[in-house]
């Protein structure tokens, strides 16, 4: 019986992955107006600094520090003004009787800020939130999930993870946890292959929160 759910944050609770893509598209539109948000959806689940490293090489950006500063300013502005919950998250979380945790590649301050913006702070106490700045290695390493398990004395067979990226699924799977893929976020456009989640170990992949509780009953 599943008693515990560990949620990824970006793309599983808040629809922020698409905002990061919007920030990168806005920045690079000055260099190439043809670039669209969808061009950056494949980076979902990675730390922003990792994406900056990859894009710096891809676009031959020499002033990486300035690029980093500019991107974070754009992301921060969009985040404060446009952050929303993914469809179905509020209803599901408020009605769920499970123990809830967050395991994310974002830093903790950003998660706390995001929860406040979308009025969900009461459902995730600070001591139930785990982030990359609390461990040695971010996802796809299992450190975040291992920390959640250890500090809360969770039983593996009573716990499920909800993830929206191959990076996150791999991290949870490496920690010995069962994982459901969730493709509710807007970054999961129709052409994106769900095998990214299956290939990394997701038990199943759902495009709606409505299907989660029924699936949990079968575990």
Image (cartoon, helix red, strand yellow):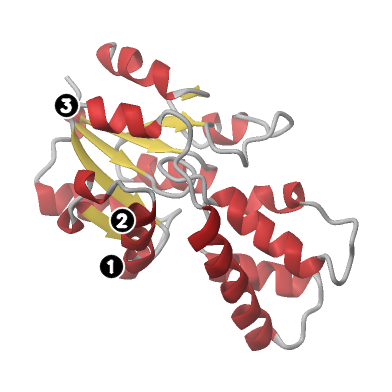
Distance between mark 1 and mark 2 Cα atoms? 8 Å
Tell me, yes or no, whether the two marked residues, 1 and 2, touch with CB atoms within 8 Å: yes
Disc nearest the viewer among 2 and 3: 3
Which sits earlier in the primary sequence, circle 2 or circle 3?
3
State the residue position of label 2: 144
| Res. 44 in view | no
Q: Secondary structure at mark 3?
A: loop
What residue is drawn where x is 60% and y is 38%? 186
Residue 101 figure quarter: top left
Which sits earlier in the primary sequence, circle 1 or circle 2?
1
Please state which of residues 175 and 21 is positioned toward the viewer in this rendering.
Answer: 21
Task: Judge left or right: residue 179 versus residue 37.
Answer: left
Q: Secondary structure at mark 1?
A: helix
- Residue 94 image point, x, y percent: 25, 31
Q: Residues within 10 Å of mark 3 (few under 14, many from 20)?
A: few
Task: Judge left or right: residue 85 versus residue 149.
Answer: right
**In the rendered image, which quarter contains the C terminus?**
top left
Q: Secondary structure at mark 2?
A: helix
What residue is drawn where x is 60% and y is 58%? 20
What residue is drawn where x is 37% and y is 21%? 212
State the residue position of label 1: 134
State the residue position of label 3: 97
| Res. 34 in view | yes
Task: Judge left or right: residue 188 versus residue 84.
Answer: right
Disc nearest the viewer among 1 and 3: 3
């Amino acid at each position: 019986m599943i008693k515990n759910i560990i949620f990824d944050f970006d793309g599983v609770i808040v629809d922020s992955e698409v905002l990061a893509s919007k920030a990168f598209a806005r920045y690079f539109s000055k260099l190439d107006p043809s670039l669209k948000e969808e061009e950056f959806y494949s980076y979902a689940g990675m730390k922003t600094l990792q994406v900056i490293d990859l894009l710096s090489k891809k676009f031959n950006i020499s002033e990486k520090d300035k690029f980093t500063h500019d991107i974070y300013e754009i992301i921060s502005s969009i985040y404060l003004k446009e952050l929303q919950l993914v469809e179905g998250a509020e209803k599901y979380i408020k009605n769920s009787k499970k123990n809830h945790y967050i395991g994310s590649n974002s830093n903790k301050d950003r998660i706390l800020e995001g929860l406040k913006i979308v009025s969900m702070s009461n459902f995730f106490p600070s001591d139930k939130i785990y982030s990359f700045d609390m461990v040695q290695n971010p996802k796809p390493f299992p450190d975040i999930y291992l920390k959640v398990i250890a500090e809360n004395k969770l039983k593996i067979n009573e716990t499920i993870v909800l993830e929206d990226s191959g990076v996150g699924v791999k991290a949870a799977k490496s920690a010995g946890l069962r994982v459901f893929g969730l493709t509710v976020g807007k970054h999961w456009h129709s052409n994106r292959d769900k095998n990214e989640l299956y290939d990394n170990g997701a038990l199943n992949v759902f495009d709606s929160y409505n299907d989660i509780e029924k699936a949990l009953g079968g575990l």
